[in-house]
Image: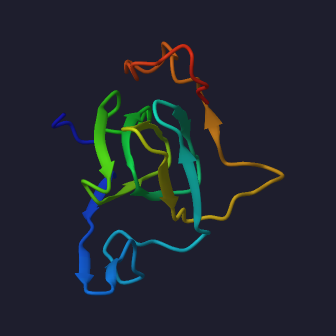
Amino acid sequence: MDAHIEGVKTKNLRVIPDERGWLMEILRSDDEIFQQFGQVYITTAYPGVVKGWHYHKKQTDNFTCVCGMMKVALYDARDDSSTKGTIMEFFVGEKNPLLIHVPPGVYHGFKGIGPDTAYFLSVPTLPYNYQEPDEYRLPPDTKEIPYDWGLDPSLKHE
């Protein structure tokens, strides 16, 4: 997919190996895409499981897959966006280390692909608000977003 959504940015992540192992910087405060720090968390997806769709009204997300592989999909639902209705798709993880910067108003979700659990590292610009979550969800198979995750009906999807 060659589509682009206004405000979505990516950063190729570089693995720096040596005889002890390797290091990969994810997000630095001097990166062009850095805005502010909210929190850091990891979530996982078992093979074939979809977590999505959701968007935020306030926070910007910065995320990557640090172990395994994920298919990440984005959908621009913003009325004031020049790219409204655009879908972007990425394959992110060990074989393609990439940070994805997702602005407010852009739906996003991911699917664990491959034989292993995928580990998703997120650095949003705001901490999670337990009393009033900045999270607005649709099911993965919603008709509001023209995207097919290729869902396996025997697996649980969020």
State the image coordinates of residue 156 (x, y, percent, origin top left): 61, 25
Above or below, comparing residue 137 to residue 31 in the picture? above
Above or below, comparing residue 2 to residue 30 in the picture? above
Quarter of the picture holding the C terminus: top right
* Left or right of 156, for residue 119: left
Above or below, comparing residue 94 to residue 144 in the picture? below
Figure label count: 0
Residue found farthest to the front: 19
* Left or right of 18, for residue 156: right
> Where is residue 42, by image quadrant?
bottom right
The residue depicted at 57 percent of the width and 22 percent of the height is 155
State the image coordinates of residue 80 (x, y, percent, origin top left): 40, 38
The residue depicted at 39 percent of the width and 50 percent of the height is 68
State the image coordinates of residue 4 (x, y, percent, origin top left): 23, 42
* Left or right of 152, for residue 157: right
User: Which residue is more in the foreground, 59 or 97?
Assistant: 97
The residue depicted at 49 percent of the width and 45 percent of the height is 117
